[in-house]
Amino acid sequence: MPDTTINNHSKVALVTGAAKRIGAEIAQQLHAAGFNVIVHYNQSAAAAQELVDELNSERENSAAGLQADLNDHAQVLNLAQQSADQWQRLDLLVNNASSFYPTPIGEATHADWDNLINSNLKAPFFLAQALAPTLIKNHGCIINIADIYAQRPLRKHSIYSIAKAGNEMLTKSLAQELAPRVRVNGIAPGAILWPDDYYKKTEEQLSDENKEKMLAQIPLQQRGQVQDIARTILFLAKDAPYITGQIIVVDGGRTITI
Ligand SMILES: NC(=O)c1ccc[n+]([C@@H]2O[C@H](COP(=O)([O-])OP(=O)(O)OC[C@H]3O[C@@H](n4cnc5c(N)ncnc54)[C@H](OP(=O)(O)O)[C@@H]3O)[C@@H](O)[C@H]2O)c1
């Protein structure tokens, strides 16, 4: 049984895919803002444990790690149940976890479809469904991380783009259905972190020249930082009581040039 003797009155956030990169920054900033944080991870157990230890060293019993493969529906439901049980409440669900890789039309498989749709769309829906009762009780909120490619597809990434387009509709649909007790919003990042693992996996190279070209297309002439996404999460969670059903684009102006 989790120790609930301390911090059981703090608001609680579940951040999926929070062991590293954008998710880890979101977890850290929510924690700094006073949330107890559930760091969900799948394969990155060591990184998740390191983050949980760091957060608990700052505030006792304020962070916990939970493992789940979002491709497995039973594990999704278990993640929701364990998250709600950890401190007997949940106030914020951040659907950040995502798989991302190309699926050219001639090569895409059923397994690719399931994998990309599960993490980016299906699991966010079923986590929201399972956690709706506790979110409703606590006047909570849901934030889904989409992508600028939800609106205009990324070439050779049809399944990912479809999944993120669905993710944006998920935001609007749930905002309608869970109002007035739960606000549901989305964030559509532009270029924040280069997807290094992805390039290793696909054996493609993102050359410095190509990086320069991509940056030149961004009006603000630089990539965003993980803090830009985490700050937007904090804004939506804490300072936006009259905003629901919206997707905030955080892309340095990239979408006005497409
Ligand atoms: N990076 C960018 O510039 C950028 C741009 C646009 C949109 N976004 C969106 O912003 C969010 C965060 O981006 P990111 O680049 O930080 O993400 P990422 O590193 O590519 O992925 C985040 C985490 O998702 C988890 N994940 C993937 N498949 C999973 C599965 N089947 N079950 C459970 N967890 C799974 C992984 O956890 P484990 O490592 O524990 O396995 C991974 O660490 C994503 O939703 C992404 O689509 C990012």
Image (tube, rainbow, N blue to C red):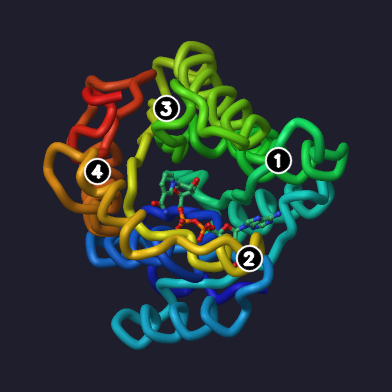
Real-space Cα separation, disc 3 to disc 1, in angstroms? 29 Å
| Image mark for residue 203 | 2
Query: What is the three-letter code of the residue carrying label 1?
Result: Thr
Residue depicted at 69% across the width and 51% down the height: 81
Real-space Cα separation, disc 4 to disc 3, in angstroms? 14 Å
Q: Earlier in the sequence, mark 4 or mark 2?
A: 2
Horizontally, residue 181 falls left or right of residue 88, namely left
Q: Nearer the viewer, residue 97 or 136?
A: 97
Q: Which residue is mark 4?
A: 232
Residue depicted at 52% across the width and 44% down the height: 95
> Would you identify the image quadrant in which residue 121 lies?
top right
Q: Nearer the viewer, residue 199 or 159?
A: 199
Q: Earlier in the sequence, mark 4 or mark 1?
A: 1
SS under mark 4: helix
Query: What is the three-letter code of the residue carrying label 2?
Result: Glu
On screen, residue 22 above or below 3: above
